[in-house]
Image (cartoon, helix red, strand yellow):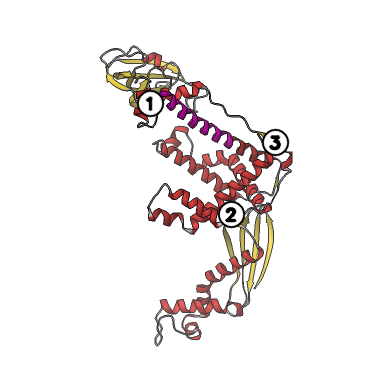
């Protein structure tokens, strides 16, 4: 078998493969068995007719056509292994020569991981920020817990600050109803100012059955771009007013919400502070990782990235957004309508970030190889056992976690974790 590799640019290769007719013999015999299994040949059991008989009945070209997929599949991967080529996606195959008693040749065009020249990371420094928790952060969490345990009682009066007012309302722009701008039984927590400025002030003083119309301007930085900075009309009907009774903050409250885990308010606050600290430290670690990788990308030189790699990453980011929207209980198609974009629009919007993610992934892989970082089987098994603590006695979960495909995923996760730890030691200053 002869093979030749040709660089095409944009991290693409053309892999040309040629086999002699003699080298095709094992594939032709295997194809003969398959043809004689699928078609009855008088005097022979299925799959047992000899090559010459099958050739006489169906023609040598038919046997070759049956063998071609197997020939290409096996020889293509043999070349990749021999030449140590790391490909991306599926190859585009073009058969160049295929005829009985002649050489067989084909060309596979495929994208490969682009090469990278990593810059001098010794020139990089990132200062780790000290995480400190302030009293008001704990206060806010405590108040949120109290509000979640609050008792609501229907009140036959006008609403005031501190109440919950249930309303129906419609939004109009230039007298035209907004698409998805109709809300039914919408609870407004008066005093929390979670909607646009001025809305709660207009609601205060209404009672069940009251209707009201007013205009408000959406903030310039409103998350929904179609409404940002726009003047809109609101039609509101008050359905009900609820008096909110927040439980007193005392030791009994601390015991109730923690199932006796905490005996005092002080213990409750201490636990909340600990949880906030862990969360803030995690955020700081994430900030450091992102900044660190982005700085390495900036000082490194990359070959041109293949389109398939960029497209796949943008596509993955769209699916991540889709999952996030679904977790909020929203239909993704409705979300797209609200922002007036399509799947393709989102992929284009994500393109710059997708390029950064691809480059950081390439750098992580290069460092992993350069530093000869290894992931042992014991480390993978330990990870599996840690995860099994969430599924005690679940044989099906263990079967999935111990599947080789999932272990490959864990090897990649652990490997990336080790790369990050290596870089932090080199770049991050306490």
- In the rendered image, residue 380, in percent from the top left (x then y), is placed at 53, 54
Residue 150 falls in which quadrant of the image? top left
Q: Does 384 sit left or right of 181 as displayed? A: right
The magenta region covers 264-285
Q: Residue at x 52, y 24 (%)?
A: 221
Task: Quote the CA–CA distance across marks 3 and 2.
Answer: 27 Å
> Which residue matches tag 2?
375
- Residue 254 is tagged as 1
Indicate which disc, 3 or 2, sits on the residue closer to the N terminus. Answer: 3
Q: Nearer the viewer, mark 3 or mark 2?
A: 2
- Asked whether the residues under the numbered discs 2 and 1 touch, taking CB atoms below 8 Å apart as contact, a structural biologist would say no
Label 2 neighbour load within 10 Å: few <14, some 14-19, many 20+ = some
- Residue 125 is tagged as 3
Residue 131 falls in which quadrant of the image? top right
- In the rendered image, residue 298, in percent from the top left (x then y), is placed at 69, 40
Task: Quote the CA–CA distance across marks 2 and 1.
Answer: 45 Å
Q: Is residue 276 magenta?
A: yes
- In the rendered image, residue 51, in percent from the top left (x then y), is placed at 50, 83
Indicate which disc, 2 or 1, sits on the residue closer to the N terminus. Answer: 1
Q: Is residue 379 magenta?
A: no
SS assignment at label 1: helix
Q: Does 13 sit left or right of 255 as displayed? A: right
Q: Nearer the viewer, mark 2 or mark 1?
A: 1
């Amino acid at each position: 078998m002869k093979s030749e590799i040709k660089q095409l640019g944009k991290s693409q290769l053309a892999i040309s493969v040629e086999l002699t007719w003699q080298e095709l013999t094992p594939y032709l015999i295997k194809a003969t068995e398959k043809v004689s299994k699928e078609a009855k040949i008088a005097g022979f059991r299925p799959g047992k007719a000899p090559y010459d008989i099958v050739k006489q009945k169906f023609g040598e070209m038919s046997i070759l056509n049956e063998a071609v997929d197997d020939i290409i599949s096996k020889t293509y991967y043999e070349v990749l292994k021999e030449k140590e080529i790391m490909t991306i996606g599926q190859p585009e195959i073009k058969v160049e020569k295929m005829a009985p008693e002649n050489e067989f040749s084909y060309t596979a065009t495929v994208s490969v991981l682009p090469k990278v020249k990593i810059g001098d990371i010794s020139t990089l420094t990132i200062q780790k920020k000290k995480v400190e928790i302030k009293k008001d952060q704990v206060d806010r969490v405590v108040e949120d817990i109290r509000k979640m345990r609050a008792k609501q009682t229907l009140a036959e009066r006008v609403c005031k600050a501190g109440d919950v007012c249930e309303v129906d309302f419609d939004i109009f722009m230039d007298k035209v109803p907004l698409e998805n701008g109709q809300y039914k039984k919408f609870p407004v927590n008066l005093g929390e100012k979670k909607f646009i400025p001025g809305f709660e002030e207009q609601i205060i003083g209404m009672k069940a059955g009251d209707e009201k119309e007013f205009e408000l301007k959406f903030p310039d930085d409103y998350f929904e771009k179609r409404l940002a900075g726009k003047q809109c009309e609101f039609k509101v009907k008050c359905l009900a007013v609820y008096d909110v009774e927040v439980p007193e903050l005392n030791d009994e409250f601390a015991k109730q919400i923690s199932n006796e885990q905490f005996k005092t308010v002080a213990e409750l606050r201490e636990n909340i502070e600990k949880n906030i600290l862990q969360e803030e430290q995690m955020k700081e670690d994430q900030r450091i990782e992102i900044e660190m990788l982005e700085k390495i990308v900036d000082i490194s030189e990359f070959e041109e990235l293949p389109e398939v790699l960029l497209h796949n990453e943008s596509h993955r980011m769209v699916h991540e957004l889709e999952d996030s929207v679904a977790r909020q209980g929203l239909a993704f198609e409705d979300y797209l309508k609200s922002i007036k974009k399509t799947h393709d629009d989102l992929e284009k919007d994500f393109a710059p970030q997708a390029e950064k993610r691809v480059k950081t992934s390439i750098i992580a892989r290069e460092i992993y190889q350069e530093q000869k970082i290894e992931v042992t089987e014991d480390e993978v098994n330990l990870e599996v056992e840690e995860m099994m603590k969430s599924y005690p006695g679940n044989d099906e979960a263990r079967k999935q976690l111990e599947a080789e495909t999932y272990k490959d995923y864990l090897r990649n996760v652990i490997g990336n974790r080790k790369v990050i730890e290596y870089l932090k030691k080199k770049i991050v200053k306490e």
